[in-house]
Amino acid sequence: EMEKYRAALVAMWFRKKKFEVVFMETFLESRMHKRHYQVECIPLSREDARQVPGYFKQEFASIKNEWSDNKQLRESTGAGARDLVPPNFSFFNIEFGLAGGFLHIIDDDREFDPGFGKKVLAGVLDLTPPRMRRHAKQSERDEQEQIRRFRADFSEFDWTNELE
């Protein structure tokens, strides 16, 4: 199901806005003694998207024991990282559309910054990392309008409509 959603999001952003999409996938096993799994879909201009792999490769190479002794950077397949990582291992995975990406095991998730991926993307976009944080709380009306617009844009790509 995740692969179908990813494919639908890639198609929607490309056809509607001519954007490329990166997916950032993070699994933290022991942060505060709970499991935490998150997948973020971030649309980027084609020009910015072309720069992303180089930025992440450089950042992974410069980790130097901050949160991982494991220097091995693995290539991911474009279908997410869950099948590539042993059970109960924390990881960060960045994928470029459906073409695959880079996977890195997190040895010490207490040292891992959950904003790692957004900070790297801030470098690509020439933004300061604080601007990548959550926006100020929106009114419920504004939030509902954003949801309505997204649903309208996504409706023709929503594979779950075929289930009805």
Image: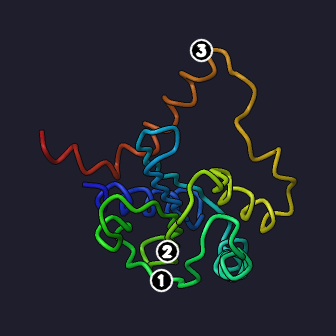
Above or below for 17 versus 104: above
Q: Marks 1 and 3, how far apart in space?
A: 41 Å
**Closest to the observer: 133 or 42?**
133
Q: Marks 2 and 3, how far apart in space?
A: 37 Å
- The quarter of the image holding the C terminus is top left
* 132 lies left or right of 74: right
Q: Nearer the viewer, mark 1 or mark 3?
A: 1
The residue beneath circle 2 is 103
For label 1, the SS is strand
Is mark 1 in CB contact (under 8 Å) with mark 2?
yes
What amino acid is at disc 1?
A: Arg
Residue 74 — which label? Answer: 1
What amino acid is at disc 2?
A: Leu
For label 2, the SS is strand
**Closest to the observer: 1 or 80?**
80
Image x and y of residue 6, in percent = 38, 59
Which of the 4 quarters of the picture holds residue 59?
Answer: bottom right
* N-terminal label among 1 and 3: 1
